[in-house]
Amino acid sequence: MKLRNISLWFFILVLLMLSANTLFMVLIQQAYSSVLQAQDHRQKSIALSNELYQETEQLVRLVRAYTITGESRYLFYYYDILAIRQGEKAAPDALNPITYWDDVIAGKIQHKLPENGTRFSLAERMKQWGFGQAEFAAFDAVLKANRDMNQIEQIAFAATQGLYDPVKQEFISEGEPHLDYASQLVHGADYNLRKASLSHAVETLLSITDARTRAEVAHETSRLQNLIVFSLLSMAATIILVMIAFNTVRRRVLQPIQQLKGIADALTAGNYAARTEQVTNARSVEELRILGQTFDSMAQSIEGDIAVRLAAIQQTKAALDSVQKKNRQIMESIAYAKVIQAAVLPSTDLVDAVLGDHFILWEPKDIVGGDIYAVARVNHGVMVAVIDCTGHGVPGALMTMITMSSIKQIISEGSCRGPAEMLKKLNALIKLSLYHQAEGESKMDDGLEIGVCWFDFDRPELRFAGARFPLLVAYQGTLTVLEGDRAQLGYKDVNVDYVFSERTMPLLDGQRFYLYSDGFVDQVGTNNFPFGRRKLHQLIQENVHKPMSEQGKIYRHALATHQGAQKRRDDVTIIGWEVRA
């Protein structure tokens, strides 16, 4: 049997049982609400009957108080009670029939009926709370007994007001009040007998109401109990069904799956001879039998494929070892190239002797790079240069070697008289080194950007020439920018006879100088914007008064903070120094 069919039948049966349980829950909720409603009706019906009894007693007390005292307020209260009962007047706000009239008579509260309040007669309220025919018949008996008492009460009211002649036993238009006679009437045996009849009629109404509401509550309670029993039976059936489903799934699905897992573990361990015929028997669902056949087919395929893969792995491992060996050789070569590139840099002793207080920030993008700097003694002074050759990494480093060799050749000849002449000669030497054949036929187009400071201490003066690089001169809080030419060196489109411009300024004690490559200002930060020349110049302006070694740390930290998680884009070089004339 298929697992899908088993699942479908169990799903339908469980859905039916859950639907039945849900229906029972809804019916139980409704039955419970009906019980609460019946109890509420019972309480309010009995309270209404008790209220009628309270009013009856209160009317008797008002009648007797009026005949004794002759105070008209008792008569007003009497008629207001009857008017409220008959729905002719609205009941006072928050009327409590047990205490309200006693508080009014005692003077604790002021009696006042609302003019626009809702009016409900006692009969209407009885209909609202479901009083039956027997209760209305008992209510009619109460009204009849009330009317019998009212006959005596009307005579007593008239005698109290001087409108009844006790001697002639008739009503008159005017006369003397007879309070004693009126009081005797409402305290006499006949009045008490009629009052007793009224009390029995009210008690009969209360008994009928109690029996009716008690039966309603018992009926709804019995219905609720029956629904609870049926619901429990339905839940028990659901539990039995779930147990049957679990046992079926365990025998037909879970146990075979556990056995298949053992076969899979054996295959994982390399035992590809393991097969599933012994576990996928007739008790298993069809899907698991098919899965077992798939396992067997996979095991056979894997056995044949493993040998091929092992051979391929051996070949791949051998190739990987060869690549790793060559990579180590390349990295060792590059590391040694860094040593060679560092060897062409000016020595630390020379830099310290020539520049004095200074900092040098030189950070190739890779192990080696296309940025380099030069410091040398020249006729009557010192030469300082920062160079950025085409590219970075190994190609850039090779360009720096050609450039530094050319610079040393120019300086060693001793005929160079300034930075502009040095750039012109360097341009020619670079072109000569790169383009052995005609420039138009060469596939190369490389060159460099450079800034050269030439200090003549005899005059004393500073001369500067640059190819795309500026020189910053700080003195007494002012930062002066000496721009280089727009031309570059060594590229095909640069004329070999190009004459670079030279800028001159006096050399003063306390001046500070800064040269940098474009790797610093072009570095993109976490905001996807470059550091920028303006930001670098402002940073130098803010820190120019600090020692050079401290400035170097500040600029390195500023670049690292700006760069964040971004990759380094280019080689970075910046040199700062102070000249003491």
Image (tube, rainbow, N blue to C red):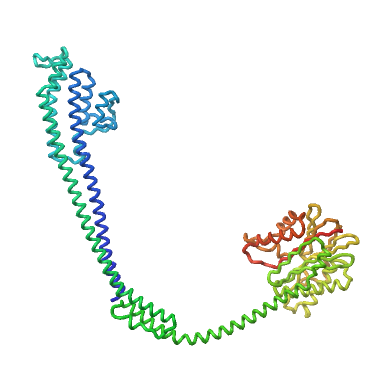
Q: Quadrant of residue 509?
A: bottom right
Q: Position of residue 95 (x, y in %)?
A: 27, 31
**176 w.r.t. 465: above or below:** above
Q: Position of residue 416 (x, y in %)?
A: 87, 69
**69 w.r.t. 441: above or below:** above
Q: Position of residue 114 (x, y in %)?
A: 29, 28
* Residue 572 at least partly seen: yes
Q: Is residue 108 left or right of residue 363?
A: left
Q: How many marks?
A: 0
Q: Quadrant of residue 243?
A: bottom left
Q: Which residue is found at the position 56% from the left and 83% from the top?
A: 317
Q: Which residue is found at the position 22% from the left and 44% from the top?
A: 39
**What is the quadrant of the N terminus in the image?**
bottom left
Q: Position of residue 429 (x, y in %)?
A: 81, 74
Q: Looking at this view, is 254 or 399 the one in front?
A: 254
* Residue 496 at least partly seen: no
**What is the quadrant of the C terminus in the image?**
bottom right
**127 w.r.t. 536: above or below:** above
Q: Looking at this view, is 282 or 432 the one in front?
A: 282
Q: Looking at this view, is 501 or 138 the one in front?
A: 138
- Seen as rendered, the residue at the extreme right is 458
Q: Quadrant of residue 110?
A: top left
